[in-house]
Amino acid sequence: MLQALCESRRSCRKFLPDPVSQELIDHILKTAATSPFASGRRNWKILVIRDREIYARLVQVVKERAESMAAEMDEDIAFLFRRYVQNFTQFEEAPVLLIPVFRIAPIMQSILRDQVTPELQSWERDNAVKSISCVVMLILLAAESLGLGACYMTGPLIAGKELAEALDLAPEQEIGAIIPIGYAHK
């Protein structure tokens, strides 16, 4: 049954305008909560966004960041880049966004204090990123099991800092992805 679910799951970027019930979202969140996480700590949460003004702000910051990056490129490369990053705002029409947010637990810093190395800090961050990816995979499979479409979008994270500010996250929190959820437009 799990194999069939995994094989049927596809990334969905076009959604019907039909709302997704809170009951279905709660089911997805409950499933995500079963995910393992590095160091056994639950240093993450999932934001549930339905507010169209927030959507608009998120789209705006991604577009602004992409344009500022393109402005520093050679014209022919910038053209290709601009075409590609148009995909980074395809979450705009989804009925709901799930945004996993994680915090790096600085265990090595607390253990090793001033002897922690940049390599260990990078390793710790990588563990958090890998862990939030496990959370995301459970979100995607839960959505699929409920007949919903979803997409694991990391492209928008080119504007990660700006997105975090738009969502009023604490400085130590990072966004793991933007996951649009809804009924797939066929």
Image (spheres, helix red, strand yellow):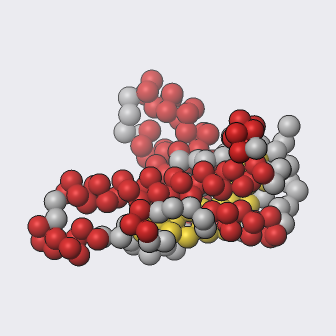
Query: With respect to residue 113, does 95 lie above or below?
Result: above
The residue sitting at 71% across, 62% down in the picture is: 28
Left or right: where 37 falls relative to 31 = left
The residue sitting at 68% across, 68% down in the picture is: 30
35 or 158: nearer the eye? 35
Query: With respect to residue 15, does 101 lie above or below?
Result: below
- Residue 166 is situated, as x and y percent measured from the top left of the image, at 54, 67
Q: In the rendered view of the protein, which quadrant contains the N terminus?
A: top right
Which residue of the protein is positioned furthest toward the right in this rendering?
A: 18
Left or right: where 147 falls relative to 99 = right
- Residue 29 is situated, as x and y percent measured from the top left of the image, at 67, 66
The residue sitting at 70% across, 39% down in the picture is: 3
Which residue of the protein is positioned furthest toward the top in this rendering?
A: 76
Left or right: where 4 falls relative to 127 = right
128 or 21: nearer the eye? 128
Q: In the rendered view of the protein, which quadrant contains the C terminus?
A: top right
The residue sitting at 59% across, 47% down in the picture is: 153
- Residue 100 is situated, as x and y percent measured from the top left of the image, at 56, 62
